[in-house]
Amino acid sequence: MAKITRRTIMKSIPTYGLAAVVPATAAAMDSPDRQLLALGVEFEARWSAERAVYEAEKGQDTHESDERCNAAARQTREVVELMTGHTAKTLAGYRLLARAYVWCRGENPDQPMAVSLDGPYDTTDKAIRSNLINSLLGHI
């Protein structure tokens, strides 16, 4: 059985343009979330680059390939860690934090998160969390 890692999950997600949810406009710079949204622009760029690395490394099962994938993920994680110091005040800020959460879980940002109460570890709080993330990202 193959080991499930962030790398194997990311390699299974097709690479196509991410729909940017972070407006890089003058209006965003007047937002109470302007610092968070500025980090969001960097986050989206790094996540896109990370996904491109994972796509390029598909089928490569070498230490060097793992290192390239891990380095790309570290670049994205640096920005996500900075985002944790900000509290969202606008819907755009909440959407950005929802996307960061999806990144942390290694999920496909273009697909809804599973909402299930069927498994032994599927609890109501997890279903509500998934529903909240899906709602913020427009998947519902």
Image: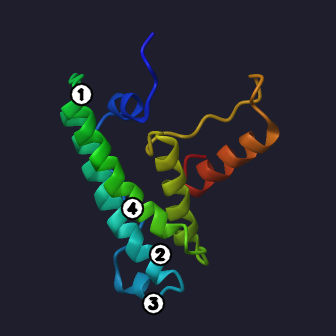
Nearest-to-viewer mark from 4 and 1: 4
Q: Residue at x 23, y 43 (%)?
A: 52
- Tag 1's secondary structure? loop
In terms of sequence position, does the residue under pointer 2 or pointer 1 come before the other?
2
* Kind of residue indicated by mark 3: Asp
Badge number at residue 58 = 1
In terms of sequence position, does the residue under pointer 3 or pointer 1 come before the other?
3
Q: Position of residue 118 (x, y in %)?
A: 76, 23
Q: Quadrant of the N terminus?
A: top left
Nearest-to-viewer mark from 2 and 3: 2
Q: Is residue 5 above or below residue 42?
A: above
Q: Spatial distance from mark 2 to mark 1, Cα to Cα? A: 32 Å
- Tag 2's secondary structure? helix
Residue at numbered disc 3? 30
Q: Residue furthest front?
A: 63
Nearest the viewer among 113 and 5 is 5
Q: Position of residue 111 (x, y in %)?
A: 48, 39
Residue at numbered disc 2? 36
Residue at numbered disc 4? 78
- Tag 4's secondary structure? helix
* Kind of residue indicated by mark 4: Glu
Q: Spatial distance from mark 3 to mark 4, Cα to Cα? A: 25 Å
Q: Residue at x 40, y 64 (%)?
A: 79
* Kind of residue indicated by mark 2: Leu
* Kind of residue indicated by mark 1: Lys
Q: Residues within 10 Å of mark 2 (few under 14, many from 20)?
A: many
Nearest-to-viewer mark from 4 and 2: 4
Q: Residues within 10 Å of mark 1 (few under 14, many from 20)?
A: some
Q: Residues within 10 Å of mark 4 (few under 14, many from 20)?
A: few
Q: Spatial distance from mark 4 to mark 1, Cα to Cα? A: 24 Å
In terms of sequence position, does the residue under pointer 4 or pointer 1 come before the other?
1
